[in-house]
Image (cartoon, coloured by chain):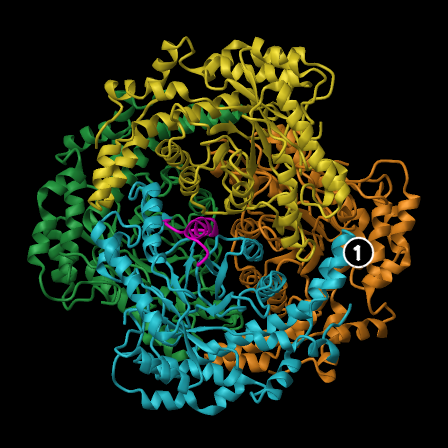
Chain colours: A green, B cyan, C orange, D yellow
Amino acid sequence: MTDPSAATGFSSITDTLDRLAIEVPSWAYGNSGTRFRVFGTPGTPRTVEEKIADAAQVHAHTGLAPSVALHIPWDKTDDYTALREYAEGLGVRLGTVNSNTFQDEAYKFGSLTSADDAVRQQAVDHHLECLEIMGRTGSRDLKIWLADGANYPGQNDLRQRQDTLAESLRTIYDQLDDGQRLVLEYKFFEPAFYSTDVPDWGTSYAHVSALGEKAMVCLDTGHHAPGTNIEFIVAQLLRLGKLGSFDFNSRFYADDDLIVGAADPYQLFRIVVEVIRGGGLDADSEVALMLDQCHNIEEKVPGQIRSVLNVQEMTAKALLLDREALAQAQADNDVLAANQVFMDAFFTDVRSDLAAYREERGLPGDPMAAFRESGYLDRIAADRVGGTQSGWGA
Amino acid sequence: MTDPSAATGFSSITDTLDRLAIEVPSWAYGNSGTRFRVFGTPGTPRTVEEKIADAAQVHAHTGLAPSVALHIPWDKTDDYTALREYAEGLGVRLGTVNSNTFQDEAYKFGSLTSADDAVRQQAVDHHLECLEIMGRTGSRDLKIWLADGANYPGQNDLRQRQDTLAESLRTIYDQLDDGQRLVLEYKFFEPAFYSTDVPDWGTSYAHVSALGEKAMVCLDTGHHAPGTNIEFIVAQLLRLGKLGSFDFNSRFYADDDLIVGAADPYQLFRIVVEVIRGGGLDADSEVALMLDQCHNIEEKVPGQIRSVLNVQEMTAKALLLDREALAQAQADNDVLAANQVFMDAFFTDVRSDLAAYREERGLPGDPMAAFRESGYLDRIAADRVGGTQSGWGA
Amino acid sequence: MTDPSAATGFSSITDTLDRLAIEVPSWAYGNSGTRFRVFGTPGTPRTVEEKIADAAQVHAHTGLAPSVALHIPWDKTDDYTALREYAEGLGVRLGTVNSNTFQDEAYKFGSLTSADDAVRQQAVDHHLECLEIMGRTGSRDLKIWLADGANYPGQNDLRQRQDTLAESLRTIYDQLDDGQRLVLEYKFFEPAFYSTDVPDWGTSYAHVSALGEKAMVCLDTGHHAPGTNIEFIVAQLLRLGKLGSFDFNSRFYADDDLIVGAADPYQLFRIVVEVIRGGGLDADSEVALMLDQCHNIEEKVPGQIRSVLNVQEMTAKALLLDREALAQAQADNDVLAANQVFMDAFFTDVRSDLAAYREERGLPGDPMAAFRESGYLDRIAADRVGGTQSGWGA
Amino acid sequence: MTDPSAATGFSSITDTLDRLAIEVPSWAYGNSGTRFRVFGTPGTPRTVEEKIADAAQVHAHTGLAPSVALHIPWDKTDDYTALREYAEGLGVRLGTVNSNTFQDEAYKFGSLTSADDAVRQQAVDHHLECLEIMGRTGSRDLKIWLADGANYPGQNDLRQRQDTLAESLRTIYDQLDDGQRLVLEYKFFEPAFYSTDVPDWGTSYAHVSALGEKAMVCLDTGHHAPGTNIEFIVAQLLRLGKLGSFDFNSRFYADDDLIVGAADPYQLFRIVVEVIRGGGLDADSEVALMLDQCHNIEEKVPGQIRSVLNVQEMTAKALLLDREALAQAQADNDVLAANQVFMDAFFTDVRSDLAAYREERGLPGDPMAAFRESGYLDRIAADRVGGTQSGWGA
């Protein structure tokens, strides 16, 4: 047993830890649920400004969440410049713009993959509008997650829809400005139950490779088949130069969208180990880390705080991995020694080191407690009365 | 290759086929969807009467669906006697009463398993109300499906909740009239994502065994872990005398609630083979067959018609299974021969025999075509204007 | 309900059916089993010639299996020219050469991905030897399936092994003759239980794309995560021009290697539909169809006969699919109609048409019965006494 | 963040930790592998005595493994009294007797479930012999794991086999002495690939409930469907009074039989939490903890040492769980607080406390290092030359 968390150990990783930034999604602060029920909570935001105010709390307490992803049309506003200034006034930036191709009545049978030209054009136009918004918000990434698929065998021409998708993506891609990127997310299933048009990393990779350098893959940690080795995909996409961004969350069964690290913290640790291994936390890395979760039953703002803290905790452990000892054990084919080096990093308790690290940076040592004591939840519950709480249908 | 569908073959199974009855759920005619979107359709029922009218269409075209399951509170009405007469006037009966413990704000953290006595009492009282309704509708079965569970490790005391559940069920069970039954459904996951309080047949079986003879297990074909051999569970529960009812549907991934037989018709065939093997289609069988599906993107009434036809088609194939030849091959450990007998039954085309069978009984040979040509969908689209379409939130 | 199997229907598909050819693997005739037990059978081949003799029986009875895949070193011989002539004398050709990187003591921790240069060179050299053998057998395809992977997190450097693999494959690829191909198989897991170096189609695709035109993906139908939509991958790889070959088998749980079509015949039907849709049965198609199965408890030769018949039966159904009606229903977004067209093809009973088709070609109408009556199994049981039965350890 | 590992915290759990005992299986020291390859290792035992000698090393270095499970016939010997004394001389006891119904040629199509009376009698007799051996070894538990099942639909009469199994088990059960128990293990799949005769805890529970008080369920942590919540089953079986024993190991995909805690240490922690919650570590508990693993590529003796240490480490964390704070958070439905209490226990680093704890008991603080430095592996590699290494076929 070695203990890499000795004082000298931890101090050696703080420079990299300082670079850790996790974007939070505006929609995490609105209500969400399952098809069975969406439970509301007092204080849930009614406007994009209130969502950003909530998101700013996460950053204020952790220093980890400097930007907020938007979802169009949920976060549409008349004046994006004002929104940008509003966010900056609260200490956060506007980040990735997420398109929505699953709620308009027109998209019942597909959007960018639709065989109906009018529907497809509507979906393409929606993305062009998103690009326009990105120009005003200063966002780099357009993230496309497609709900397109089929519930029954025979419903769609699987092959044709790939060609149609390629064409739609090309039209959008060609409108990207310098410095903008298109990130294409994949998902194993849901809401389509038989086939999904971008179901796996291979499909996303094939499309973004065909598009060009500004197109990248988005990996959502909850969007894989049972048993999939996600850290392998992370390593592979980094190797191929095509890992654009992460949607972090965790899962036991399907796309459960639970707090990242809650279901299997060791898996999150292994994922971060590969992110680091592949340069994803290097100073010049362009890999974007983001949360994409649903706080169906727990409080939303502290749910997000816990999430970014979980990523930070696993990152600290992963940075403490004794890569030299690991390389030696691997070279010796000493399976037990290699695994022990790995587990030793995971089982190193970094919580007090992280508390001290935070305090050195003017942050609360225990962000969860600090937020709880701040009275923010009571305040928004009292203030945000009337109006319509935000949610997926908003 | 043997062909058991010869004229004499088919005629030998019609008596059993005549007994086939599949209850349809009132909620299948309302709107449903995923957490991402519930698409509406013109003509969707606004009232329980309209749901029953739609259900009656299924029976009128197939002769297979003589009863309609109700869902309380979605189908609450002031006068159940009138509702019963209304249904009977349309040629169908009121069937199983399904309770709802997932939509009231109070049930956010549990219902019959809640640690909060007031919540638990509310949930128990709801079931007692269901029993009262059953008295008036003439229903035999109270079906309990619980959404109760947890999203995060530590959230609940897993052990305590089983004890609480046992106590709640006992209170309800003790109020059953003679001839009434409690059927306890199990489900692998959703809407809870870490633990579910009745997640598998073993749990349901342990509870209903403890309760007594009037308590039975309900098997929903979509509520199992990936790879589960469902026909084995059917055989086992029939052997144990505890298979109360089925919720039929099909799935590729999770609880997709697709049309039964659509995802894996051979699995449905195997399930029906075990139903027959275990006496589930015998004249004195008390096993209830029911659909529980969501027609998110396809038309609802024909979706239900297709569903009961699929069950009928697989039942005909299963009845044509040459059990004598099968038993011989099994006794000989002739794996290939046994499998061939099995597959031969499955691959026997019974469609034209079934068409003739239907016509002999005054039904349309092709119920799907007959319904399409009936103009019913256009009629309800024209008639049912205004009001609020039924759905899970109704 | 339409019935596309009318006489005119079936006659329209026979030209394509005539092109159907399914390679059988030499190792299917040897003993196989699980880690718990390999059961032997009287008559199991002791030599490569006896395996080929068994394989020739499959072709003789079905006309479907004109070639036999070899496995090196299991099928090594001193004189490949003689072996080729021997096979041709029995009416079959030698086909794909399969390398073996899982049985030599040296490969305990990897072969083409090994961090140990000597081991890696041994593995590369083995493939170069295979290429040499291919020159003599007249084989087109070198199939590489790698057992390489890790059982424990930390054991391997996931990223490094991909680079090493790319380098190894490049060395082998560069030695391919004109007309030769390298097909790279992927597998979800087993024998490695934590990570596998070529675990999914995306990884195989990334490697073969980098290699060049003579490198293709091999899709084994049993090598996917639970719930994976395999026909989607088929459609995608055909679209990308990178589907080299199939290993057919079926599965309920893991890589069960059961008779193709035995676990889920509807899935096999859907796969073949996409093969046809993507040109895989066109006259100029270079997609190779092959079996890769283990007959652990059933008789091996009739197990193989049943397998090629299952593929033929599903192919006939898939060819009978009314693609015009399907396209119309798809264009109308008529989900139920599209699904019905699909199911109608699947439920069309082609067995007697196929029997007649076979007889027209001088083959037995019922190959399973004809083989059983041939007495071949008794003959080889009597003849093949002594020696060592072939198996995976041979 | 609370830190329950303060000195006073750890000292409060040592009494319970002292009770922790994990039986090790004799077969873990022999060679094992996959169907692709069994790699041998220098020093692998050739006899049951050598296996016990290896097992004694685990106990000598950890104080955690006071007994060794036997496997019949692999560990058959002429003189069990001598074997018992041999073991005791090395400081360990003989424990559970495991029967073997998967290797005899007769069991190809089943053993206790066989439709062939002679085969079934042979299997019953084998268990009666095991009972006789138990009398001489002083073992309490007869563990039955059945490989019985089918590879193809139709192969077996699923229902009949349950009745046959019940009858076979009854015959064996009736021969149990006072103080002896029958523990019936279940397994999701493998080596049977379509149906398994005891596939889930429900089936095992139904059988042992019917048998009586001396029959219990054995839960192997690797024998479940993907996504199964194992700690729920632990809680349920303890509640029902039917959890007889554990087979510990870990898995990513199937029954991988990896080192317990290696795949998902948090899951192991949650399992142990429920063991403790249900009284499984109480002074009067009769729950047996055992390893059942395969060290295919890593060294066997240190693989076993690592395994029992992993269980000890997770047990210490689970004992440190602040159950009072947890109960309060649960009562408050404070999901985040409850989860944090849970995670805080898991992330508490108990490694140095455990090292001190061991040293206080005269054991090495770092058992892995101590064993490595002992030179034992070199010694057995040098000594155990010639003979046949033990393995599953031995």
Q: Is residue B311 left or right of residue D286?
A: right
Vertical comparison of C344 with C178: above or below? below
Residue at left 13%, top 58%? Answer: A50
Work out which quarter of the rendered image holds the C terminus of chain C and state it. Answer: top right
How many numbered markers are drawn? 1
Chain letter of the residue carrying label 1:
C
Q: Could you say which quadrant of the image residue B52 lies in?
A: bottom left
Residue A191 x/y as whole percent: 39, 64
Residue at left 73%, top 72%? Answer: B4
Badge 1 amino acid: Pro
Residue at left 86%, top 46%? Answer: C50
Q: Which residues are magenta?
A: B196-214
Residue B381 x/y as whole percent: 35, 87
Vertical comparison of D322 with A57: above or below? above
Q: Residues within 10 Å of mark 1 (few under 14, many from 20)?
A: many
Vertical comparison of A175 with C122: above or below? below
Q: Can residue B117 be seen here?
A: yes
Comparing B192 with C171, the one in front is B192
Residue C191 x/y as whole percent: 60, 39
Comparing D51 with A47, the one in front is D51
Q: Secondary structure at mark 1?
A: helix
B204 drawn magenta: yes
Work out which quarter of the rendered image holds the N terminus of chain C and state it. Answer: bottom right
Q: Is residue D234 left or right of residue D14?
A: right
Q: Can residue B150 be seen here?
A: no
Residue where numbered disc 1 is placed: C302
Q: Is residue B234 left or right of residue C51?
A: left
Vertical comparison of B194 with D271: above or below? below
Residue D240 x/y as whole percent: 43, 40
Q: Could you say which quadrant of the image residue B323 lies in?
A: bottom right
C5 drawn magenta: no
